[in-house]
Image (cartoon, rainbow, N blue to C red):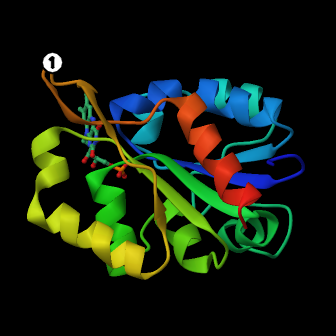
Amino acid sequence: MLKGKKILLGISGGIAAYKSPELIRQLIAEGAEVKVVATKNALEFVTPVSLQTVSRNRVYFEVFEPIGNFNPEHISHADWGDMLLVAPATANIIGKFACGIADDALSTLYLAFDKPVFIAPAMNTRMYEHPVVQRNMRQLQAFNVQFIEPVYGELACNTLGKGRMEEPENIVSFLKEYFDGN
Ligand SMILES: Cc1cc2nc3c(=O)[nH]c(=O)nc-3n(C[C@H](O)[C@H](O)[C@H](O)COP(=O)(O)O)c2cc1C
């Protein structure tokens, strides 16, 4: 059940970010509220206007943005969300999360967030299979992060392999099953 759930959707700079508006639409159709937290590189692939129109909320991507209250946004967003879903998650953002690096809005929010975290990686097969990426994912699993595994298919680099982000409807099903069982 996602009805009434407040979902922070983290988007990082992978080609699969073009699917984000569709993912948001499906989450909202399930009765969830969605706020987007994007890396600046994600916004090379999908625009804030699309994301805020579909999510019906302003997109948070700048740590040092003047705001109308005294609670920094990485904290107010962390207070607001029931879960953090990062889809697509780049090799870079997974590495930052695993190492505690907090140098942008999404990685800073991750450290301030103490509720369930779900990560849907998406990247080239060689990147996905690289030992350092595999190590970073194991590290995050040890921190109780849930992974929504990428699938085999066509990749942005025009090859076939494992690394394609799971389809939005399957990400939504994964979250529904998780919350039905917890
Ligand atoms: C066209 C294009 C597609 C890319 N797709 C991916 C991808 O699917 N996964 C990934 O990990 N990196 C991908 N990258 C590389 C990331 O954009 C790059 O590592 C960037 O620093 C990630 O920044 P972020 O994690 O802050 O969003 C891609 C780059 C380009 C130019």
28 to 103, vertically: above or below: above
Residue 16 x/y as whole percent: 40, 30
At label 1, the amino acid type is: Asn
The image shows residue 162 at horizontal and vertical percentages of 22, 37
Mark 1 surroundings: few (<14), some (14-19) or many (≥20) residues within 10 A: few
How many numbered markers are drawn? 1
Residue 146 visible in image: yes
Q: Which of 63 and 53 is in front in this view?
A: 53
Residue 125 position (above or below residue 129): above
Specify the farthest residue to the right.
4
Residue under numbered circle 1:
158
Q: In which quarter of the image is residue 78?
A: bottom right
Q: Where is residue 143 in the image (x, y as percent from the top left)?
A: 45, 81
Question: What's the residue at 59%, 46% (across, down)?
Answer: 174
Q: Which residue is drawn at 55% across and 35% down?
A: 170
Which quadrant is the C terminus positioned in? Answer: bottom right
Vertical position of residue 137 compared to residue 176: above or below: below
What is the x, y in percent for residue 41? Answer: 39, 42
Drawn side of residue 91 relative to residue 111, left or right: left
Compared across the picture, whether 77 is left or right of 16 comes to: right
Q: Who's the residue at 26% across and 70% down the image?
A: 136
